[in-house]
Amino acid sequence: MKGLLSKSKSYDVGFICLLIALFYFFNFQNYFFLHPQGVHFIRQTDSLSFVSNYYNNGFHFFTPSLYNLASINGNGVCEFPILYYLASVLYIIFGEKEFILKLIHLLIFFIGLFHVYKLSYLVLKDYMYSYLVPFFILASTSLVYYSFNFLPDIAALGFALSGWYFGFKFKENKVTRPLIFSIFFFLISSLLKVTYLINPFAFLGMSLIEFLLVKKQDTNSRKIILKQFYYFGISFLVVMVWNVFVFFYNIKNQSTYFTTSILPIWDLTIQERSIYWNDILSEWYKKYLAETSFHALLLGLIFIGIFFKKIPINLKLALLFSAFGTISYFLLFFQQFRFHDYYYLLFFPFIIFILLSFFQIWKQLFPNNLGQNILKFVFLVIIASGLNYSRIKLEERYYKGNDLNSKIGFQILKNKQFIDDVKIPKDSKVLIGPDLSVNGGLYFIKRKGWPINNADEITKEKINFFKSQGADYFILVNDSKSQKILDDLGRKLFKNRDLSIYKL
């Protein structure tokens, strides 16, 4: 027993060391202190705006707020803000350091990956396969990019992966403690992103079918299934209460910014569906996974289709229910996949169950060492290629970080000292433009106000309207054409090649 424990711990330590090595392999140390930029700059600055508002405007947990005053006082909410609040509390200790939120997300995701490794061993009883499964999914540029980023989706995924491990652990020993852990992780995941409810629903569905398939249902088995329904029922109620709060909080504050309803495929015309589908494939396809990894998954699906009966019941049901949940999610939010690759992160539990099922089938078809070693070697090559692919594509994303949406961030940071020297009062309301983001420019100056997206929209009428709403200052970025308008409406406090600041 001691030898087995020692072996298990050594593999655990080895896996953790590999995760640390991957941190440097992906050059995360070079991205450590980078401010929001590049792909989904807008959503990155939304997340940081929540954190910054907690820190700068009071730690009122149930009053989440943004810098954009499109809603009443910027109040608005989408995901459960527990991680934003945690980051803001850590700001008290370490100062307002953006990397704190990134580190929180990365730590949660790495813990989720560790639990994927533990889940894989629980199912396959083979340490080599257990290493292959979690590292295989890192062939996704999107996954790696968001793993060390500001969006909460990666944390929701990490918690969901942990929930699946403890769920399977519960099924193995029927002890309550792993079930409590599973429910807790699924609950936090679903609070962060309500769409991740498909994971606990899949787990509960698999448990119910498994119970119904048992010919002799004794008192103990009935107690076990009732216990699961009871605990999951409570967690589902908590998620629903939170989403009711979101609904009424946004109505009360006239916030319409966040997507809180489905955007299904059937709301599109046939022509629109074709356009969306082509955009999804052309824009995101090779960022979801490396091409060879897609081929490996396709091979796995073929084997699963042919040898489905060889899959153990627990794994079979997890595969089926996660497939149903993933497909339903894709159809319900189809329109979002056109421009938002982070929606794809929810696919990964299903991908993991494809790999586990494929490896389980292969072990039964080719039980000898030669057959096992051939597959392991092939997957090692695929993973090595996929990891390098992710690293290269990740570098490309950061290299192109100064895009149209992100430009405002670069300009503000470049001139931050000049802006600070003007001493705009913290309670002032600021207009900033042109700014294609929602909270980007405002976040970097840490002032509430309104962005004006395009230079053509900077008119006397619009500025006077915002003045009537309380706008005190205007920061004009890279737009000489609008200076004459602002010269007539305000007093110039500062000007250089990049920006001008006016007191309205």
Image (tube, grey):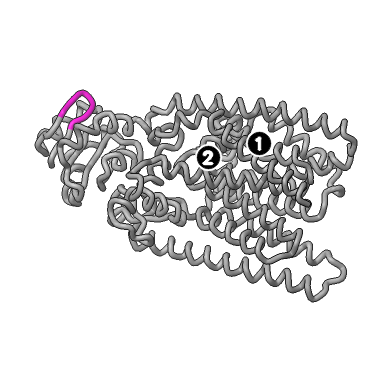
Q: Which residue is located at x 58 percent, y 29 percent? A: 390
Q: Which residue is located at x 13 percent, y 42 percent? A: 504
Question: From what the image shows, is residue 76 above or below residue 98?
Answer: below
Number of the label disc, if any, that sits on residue 135:
1
- Tell me which amino acid carries mark 1: Phe
Give 460 or 309, whichever is nearer the viewer.
309
Q: How many marks?
A: 2
- Magenta part of the protein: which range? 495-500
Estimate the spatial distance between the alpha carbons at disc 2 and disc 1, rounded to whole Å.
13 Å
Residue 488 image position (x, y, % from top left): 10, 35
- Tell me which amino acid carries mark 2: Ser
Q: Is residue 67 left or right of residue 468?
A: right
Residue 163 image position (x, y, % from top left): 63, 55
Q: Which residue is located at x 40 percent, y 55 percent? A: 77
Q: Which residue is located at x 64 percent, y 37 percent? A: 137
Q: Which residue is mark 2?
A: 147
